[in-house]
Amino acid sequence: MAAKTSVFYLTESLACATSGTDVTDTVDLGAYVDVADRQGVLVHQADFIWQGQNATGAWEPLLTALNGDGEGCIQVTDLNRGSMVFADDRALVASATISTDSSNHATYTGSDLFPDNFGPTSAQGGRIVINDQMYVRARWTGAIDSNKAVRCVVRMKVSVIGLNQKDFMAIALQSTAADN
């Protein structure tokens, strides 16, 4: 496996304005993934930033956008499942959760990245994606103030890599199996 690029960042932002409703978007990888050259995207790290959004669309502290306790979840997958998935789903690339306790003005967060075991040691601990899109889905459950939103930004540290034929085929087979 050879690195085709240095590290760069892909960013996607989702705004949850209605409690319990999924919000989705995609991250286009078409310019980076090339099947003929066995080229994919290695996700080294995924960071999730939770913020409040006021009625004018501007940033505000998360807890001021809320009207009580709440819980958020965001997931990045390499296949479109159409809903939130469990942690054992092979399409899951990264995810995060947050819980807010408005009476104590506290938040509790956690996030994870689901790595592959393909390629040399330098790729271990990251997730290789060979699909032309990643799917981002977020949901907030809890009271959101009127005309406000909870925004979650996912910022992924990635690089474009070349894979040997065996690793590329293994990833393609895993992705196909995960599609079922």
Image (cartoon, helix red, strand yellow):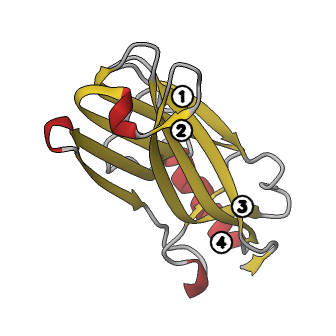
What is the distance, in whole Å, between disc 4 and disc 3 at their CAs? 14 Å
> Is residue 92 visible from the viewing direction of this image?
no
Task: Residue 163: name its quadrant.
Answer: bottom right
**Residue 110 screen position, x and y as percent:** 31, 56
* SS for dot 1: strand
Mark nearest the camera among 4 and 3 is 3
Residue extending furthest left? Answer: 103
Left or right side of 16 for 133: right
Res 166 label: 4
- Give the mark toward the camera: 3 or 2: 2
In primary-sequence order, the first of circles 2 and 4 is 2
- Three-letter amino acid code of the residue under disc 2: Val
Q: Rounded to the nearest whole Å, what is the CA distance between mark 1 and mark 4?
A: 33 Å
Q: Residues within 10 Å of mark 1 (few under 14, many from 20)?
A: many
**As shown in the figure, which amino acid type bears the numbered disc 3?**
Gly
Mark 1 sits on what residue? 24
- Amino acid type for the residue under numbered disc 1: Thr
Give the residue number, with chain letter if any, for mark 3: 40
For mark 3, give the secondary structure: strand
